Amino acid sequence: MHSYEEIFEYNKKWIAQKKATDKDFFTHLAEGQNPNYLYIGCSDSRATAEELMGANPGDVFVHRNIANIISNVDLNVMSVIVYAVNHLKVKHIVVCGHYFCGGVKAAMQPQDLGLLNPWLRNVRDVYRLHKEELNNIKDEEKRYMRLVELNVEEQCINAIKTAAVQKTYLTTGYPLVHGWVFNVKNGELIDLKINFVEKLKGIQEIYNLGNSE
Ligand code: CO
């Protein structure tokens, strides 16, 4: 990593590099954004969004928080989803978790974590929903990895619960919601192959917001 001062030196080199490949790079960038992807991932410094996807500026609308949570009452992530779906008209929403996630690990410890309690309770709720499956996994590391995957799946469901996603999908066929896990041990990106249509059908009995009065 560059030292603090070197960051600005690096930035100058980066500008020159971009202009050398495409002299109008920043002119185009200033014209606006039209990303196809909304990426919701963990704040963990190892699980970057753009780099692991091979994405360039303008390609991905990004939201990151501890343990990639889509909380129904978090105005921040809800605003990001509504803006990305209704205004940017993204085609794909990706929820990307990662193995060895500190937030998920902390949620697995039954102890008071102060201000982090209400946030990590979202992950603890995922554990409760899938307690039977998780408690049957005797190996602690495997159980931890499975909770990371189940957390991604549940956060995908939280995205599908939103009116913005349901309404837009029913009229345009987009956005599709995907669940990924990044393995920090080997760099692999895993598609959990969440069945979006089936998940939507499954939750519509209770969370059908596709029609408004
Ligand atoms: Co994490």
Image: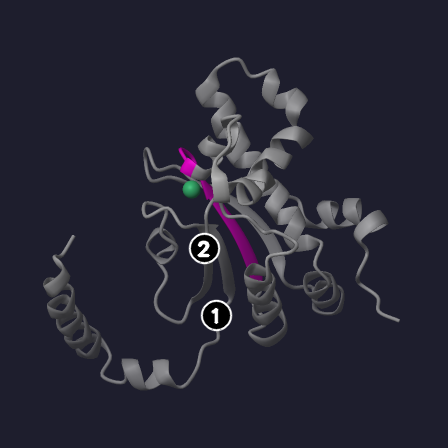
Q: Compared with residue 180, is residue 105 higher up or lower down, i.e. above or below?
A: above
Disc 1 marks a residue whose amino acid type is Pro
Q: Residue at x 65, y 64 (%)?
A: 174
Quadrant hosting residue 25 = bottom left
Please say if the residues under marks 2 and 1 sit with CB atoms less than 8 Å apart. Answer: no
Q: Which residue is mark 2?
A: 64
Q: Which residues are magenta?
A: 92-102
Q: Which residue is mark 1?
A: 35
Residue 123: x, y in percent? 57, 38
Depth check: give the residue in front, 190 or 102: 102
Disc 2 marks a residue whose amino acid type is Arg
Depth check: give the residue in front, 176 or 65: 65
Looking at the image, tell me whether mark 2 or mark 1 is earlier in sequence order.
1
Residue 125: x, y in percent? 64, 36
Q: How far apart are the two marked residues, 2 and 1, measured between alpha carbons?
A: 16 Å
Looking at the image, residue 62 sits to the left or right of residue 76; the answer is: left
Q: Compared with residue 130, is residue 40 higher up or lower down, i.e. above or below?
A: below
